[in-house]
Image (cartoon, grey):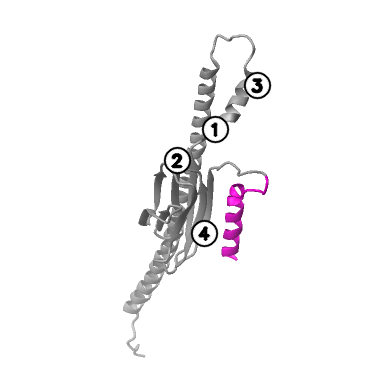
Amino acid sequence: MMAAGAALALALWLLPSIGVGGAGPPPIQDGEFTFLLPAGRKQCFYQSAPANASLETEYQVIGGAGLDVDFTLESPQGVLLVSESRKADGVHTVEPTEAGDYKLCFDNSFSTISEKLVFFELIFDSLQDDEEVEGWVEAVEPEEMLDVKMEDIKESIETMRTRLERSIQMLTLLRAFEARDRNLQEGNLERVNFWSAVNVAVLLLVAVLQVCTLKRFFQDKRPVPT
């Protein structure tokens, strides 16, 4: 059931990257995904990438004992680009990229009982189509000359868009950090409550035993003469 849910979420996440016949390839989009990695299992994901772009991969283990996982990243040609063992998080950049499908694998086979909650995000550099830019300029450029050049306006808009996209990515990472810290705090709270209850029970048991022992010391079992 858990594997089916993860597969369905993966299909929905990769859906924008699947082309429709006759419509042409859609643009590569950034994506983020959170999934549950069972103990003793390895999960791999494939993401298509254009040529001569920049791909940034960020991942975090936000739940599970140890908060660690093995991570590998392979190029479309099968070349191992990144290999990490027992890491809680990581950030890796591939530049320039090759056209094809990159393979990301998360391995929890070293753990026999603890499942891991893993978050990862794929960020591509934002490349605008030249034809779209030229069409936009032709649509908004007035016939008379303006004091401000259109190139300056385009540069300002592009800079603002890039900063907004980066802000969204940082907020996503902050949410992942918050989720990991919350899971860690909740786990610590459960352990503290459990051992506190054990300590209270032991203290009560010791107190009862001490009272019973003291009562035995003051009991006079000698026969009373009549």
Residue 67 visible in this rendered orientation of the protein: no
Observer-nearest of 76 and 68? 76
Looking at the rendered structure, the kind of residue marked 2 is Ser
> Badge 4, how many Cα within 10 Å: few under 14, some, many 20+?
some
Magenta-colored span: 1-22
The residue positioned farthest toward the right in the image shown? 22
Q: CA distance from mark 1 to mark 4?
A: 35 Å
Apparent side of residue 79 relative to residue 43 in the rendered image (left or right): left
Q: Amino acid at mark 3?
A: Ala
Q: Which residue is mark 3?
A: 139
Q: Earlier in the sequence, mark 2 or mark 4?
A: 4
Give the main secondary structure, helix, strand or loop, of the magenta stretch.
helix
Q: Residue 47's x, y, as percent?
A: 51, 51
C-alpha distance separating marks 2 and 1: 14 Å
Q: Position of residue 79 (x, y in %)?
A: 39, 55
Residue wearing tag 2: 54
| Amino acid identity at mark 4 | Leu
Q: Which residue position is annotated with label 1?
A: 128
Q: Where residue 133 sits: x, y (%)?
A: 58, 27
The spot of residue 29 in percent (x, y) is 55, 42
